[in-house]
Amino acid sequence: MEIGQVVMAGPQPFSDVSVTLAPPLGERDPSVPLRGREQLLQVLLQLCLEKSDGLLHVLHGMSGCGKTAVALELVSRLNALAGQERRRRVWWVNARHGVTLAAGLRAVARQAGLRAEEIHSSDAADALWERLGQLPYPWLLVVDEAEDMTLLDGPGRLTAGTGWLRPGSGIRGLVVVTTRHGMARLWGSAAVLHAVRPLTAKDAARVLMDHAGTRTGSASEAGDLAERLGRLPLALRMAGSYLAEANSVPQAFRETGTPSDFRSYQRVLDGHNARPHPAQVVAEAWRMSVGLLHQQGLVLAGRTLHVLASFEDALIPYTLVMQPSALSRAVPGFADVDGTTLWRTLRELAALGLVDLIDASAEHGRLPAVRLHPLIRDMARSGTDTAVALMEQALDLEEVRIPPEDPRSWPTWKALAPHALGLLQHVGSSGQRFSAAQRTVCADAAELAARFLQTQGLSSQARQEFERVLAVRTEMLGPESLETITTQHNLGSVLHDLGDLEAAGELYRNAWHALRRLRGEDHHDTLTARHELGRLLHDSGRLDEARDHLTAVFNVRRRTGGEEDQHTLAARHEMARVLHDQGELHQARMEFVALLRIRDVQLGEHHPRTITTRHNHACVLHDLGLLQEAQEECRKALDARQALYGAEHPRTLATAHRLALVLYDVGLGAEAVAVLQSVAEGTSRVLGPDHPQALDCAELLELWVGDQGGVT
């Protein structure tokens, strides 16, 4: 049997995080050639098309020098050879954050043909590189933005060849890494370092002319400006885009003094004493680009960049956190801003190379987003107060108010979670700088994000976030506030998921008793806390106590909400689970059949609560000896959970575990062992090897494998 699905009302949160392995070719402009990297590209192409040397090829250089552009150009050229190399696989993994790096490499392993139990085993890195070495077709793996070297160590050490990235002899693939780190000792002896430096004067001048057009000066003048810009591709692109935009404005409408050619642009740089250090050069180019937009009437361009820079280093879902009405209310300088002006500002910032606009796609939760180059973000960032104010506005949006446990909210919280959790980190590091109201916003947002993490099966990460929220709540409000009690209850819920029933029970009891004092015996929140305590008592085997609590909750819920209220049905569902474990199988079956009928109508067959009911119905059928019916229900529930959560979510694993038991009793021993092996690996990885479910799986698997007569 498994836990039910009831959550406490009010502020209360990723299995694998969703990733894409598709190269971001939309960031490459095919109309503009990549200058100055031909020799490096030919080396990499030769390794791809002929025989790989089995080493890691590291493209290193300062921020803004075009490392990712080289990798994208390599992918584009390989794609152009698709007619000759139809079976080549290309995988692109972002290494900026540990969770996306690990999820991306596991996705590579899946596409390379590893089984689920191998992908999520403790030696997944070993299995991945063994499999890549066996692939009969050529492949390319790009690991982009590898700035935190410790993430590449994975289960071992990168320099020792035991990390997430490894050399390999005889492989048919190439590994390319982009990073700022070019020290050989950080990569070990199995890496080839390729420095991606500022361009030569000639190539830099060509880049300027490519972006600026033909009315901006001679090649010699372009060369002088390119030298002034440090020959850095990012600065060159920004300056060239600026001049192209400036020259698109009719002369009669152009503000006096606006640079419109290479010489005048350089004079402005010289007038501001911008030093040739790349960061200062980019900062001045950024300032001039913003100034041009101001001249064109987009007076919010600079402020918009500062707003974007206040968020975390992740894709920013601007339709959630930058709605015009929210900006107008919360951010000084945006009074009465309208959507047309804001959208035009974002588009013009993108046209000048200051931001990238990302269309809605599964890559980032199907929400449109904007991305800042890290160097520009660092220069434009002046604090997080603006992000806090806009997060407060976002929390009031209808789509954000959908509980994180509801699948309809998952794209929203997938996009918001990095920013919500990041804000709480700032509270922890500099809490005295935030007002009490700001700290409350950060705690509320982080608690919702933690609930999303819990719903997605990332229980350990959710636990850490709930603990951080609880520390903030307790310091601000004390242990007896409703908000603190709610967070304690949510922490108890995730500890329940993790199998720490004793700690969870203490938190549940504390919450229930506190809410009885503060809210009254029959208040919604009090009933929720008592319901969860009943669930825990059931899972602890204290069935009579569980039945007493759940019956009391059911009676009040039915009286106040009616027979088919969702909370009434939730209590009825948990009572049916108790009936099952007390041996009243026929009555339990009747209850689950009735609940399935109601939830199918109210919620649909693919809703999490309907699937949970189907799972538990299958459990009763199994114990009644109705094996064919149990197998059918199990497979339906398993298919639904895999589609909803993925193969390695705890709820999916619970259903797969039950299916293994049914298959074994049907006589399909070999299939049962295979399914249980997968469940054991997944449960150990997701919940930990000491979790009761993981221990049960391991013990049963050992018994089945040893029982040769039971395996067909």
Image (tube, rainbow, N blue to C red):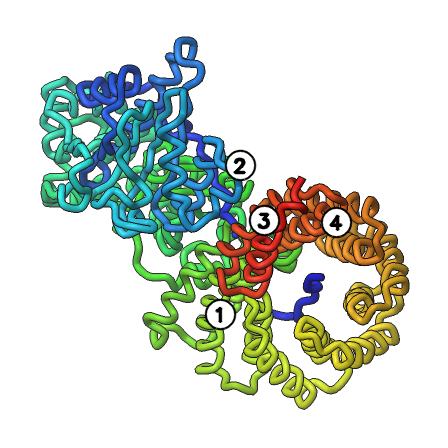
First in residue order: circle 2 vs circle 4:
2
Residue 44: percent from left, percent from top: 24, 22
- Identify whether 521 is placed above or below 51: below
First in residue order: circle 3 vs circle 2:
2
According to the image, label 3 marks what residue? Answer: 705
Q: Is residue 128 visible?
A: yes
According to the image, label 2 marks what residue? Answer: 361
User: Alpha-carbon neighbours of circle 2 within 10 Å: few (<14), some, or many (≥20)?
Assistant: few
First in residue order: circle 1 vs circle 4:
1
Q: Are marks 3 and 2 in contact (CB under 8 Å)?
A: no
First in residue order: circle 3 vs circle 4:
4
Quadrant in which the N terminus appears = bottom right
User: Alpha-carbon neighbours of circle 1 within 10 Å: few (<14), some, or many (≥20)?
Assistant: many
What kind of element bears circle 4?
helix
- Give how far apart the Cα atoms at labels 2 and 4 are: 44 Å
According to the image, label 4 marks what residue? Answer: 665
First in residue order: circle 1 vs circle 3:
1
Amino acid of disc 4: Asp
According to the image, label 1 marks what residue? Answer: 443
Q: Residue at x 42, y 59 (%)?
A: 387
Amino acid of disc 1: Ala
Q: Residue at x 16, y 25 (%)?
A: 204
- Give how far apart the Cα atoms at labels 1 and 3 are: 48 Å
Please identify, in this view, whether the residue under mark 2 or under mark 4 is nearer the observer: 4
Amino acid of disc 2: Ser
Amino acid of disc 3: Val
